[in-house]
Image (cartoon, rainbow, N blue to C red):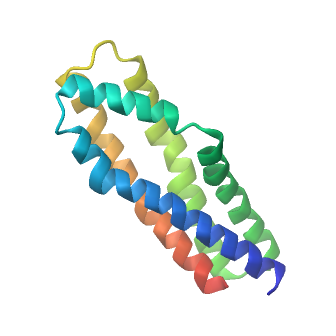
Amino acid sequence: MTLTQILALVAAIGSGMVAGIFFIFSTTIVASLERLPVEQTVAAMQAINRVILAPLFLMLFTGTALVSIVVVVTAAGEPLAWIGAALYVLGSFVLTMVVNVPLNNALDQANGGGAETWQAFRPRWMVGNHIRTVASIGGAIAFTLLV
């Protein structure tokens, strides 16, 4: 295997793992939280948003973005490298920083955890999460095809 193929494999695995995390939020976690009283839903999401900042997740999430960029640099103009990196870096990493993190921070700062708080948070957060899920899956596919 070439260096580019090894890096593309690492990026594919990272993109796939991140996609799985986002997918489980879209399909299970948020729906499960919504079966609780809304105050507990908000409190649980606030706790999740703090816990997910653990070093292991941040290393996976950020490291995959960095490896994606390195794949583009080493791939000498390979379109799949650009597609994979654009999908993961823009569609997952940047979208998270621009949409989901600000919403998480606003939820964390919310006084009280009533229905209004949750309704202000949930729709935009879920749309962002669905997009970054699909983008991460697409990135994983593009990087896999590069290998």
Q: Quadrant of the N terminus?
A: bottom right
Establish if 147 lies above or below 123. below
Q: Position of residue 41 (x, y in %)?
A: 26, 31
Would you place residue 121 above or below residue 7 in this image?
above
* Residue 5 relative to residue 27: left or right: right
In terms of depth relative to the viewer, which is nearer, 43 or 147?
A: 43
Return the x and y of residue 78 as percentages of the image width and height. 71, 82
Q: In this view, does 133 lie above or below 71?
A: above
Position of residue 34 relative to residue 43, above or below, is below
Left/right of residue 39 with respect to residue 129 in the rendered view: left
Residue 132, x across and y down, in percent: 45, 56
Q: Where is residue 64 in the image (x, y as percent from the top left)?
A: 65, 59
Q: Relative to the observer, which residue lies in front, 87 or 49?
A: 49
> Which residue does the image show at 57% across and 62% down from the upper left?
88
**Is residue 25 visible in this depiction of the protein?**
yes
Relative to 30, 131 lies left or right:
right
Depth check, front residue: 26 or 57: 57
Q: Residue drawn 47% across and 61% down?
A: 19
So how many labels did they put on this image?
Answer: 0
Q: Residue at x 75, y 77 (%)?
A: 6
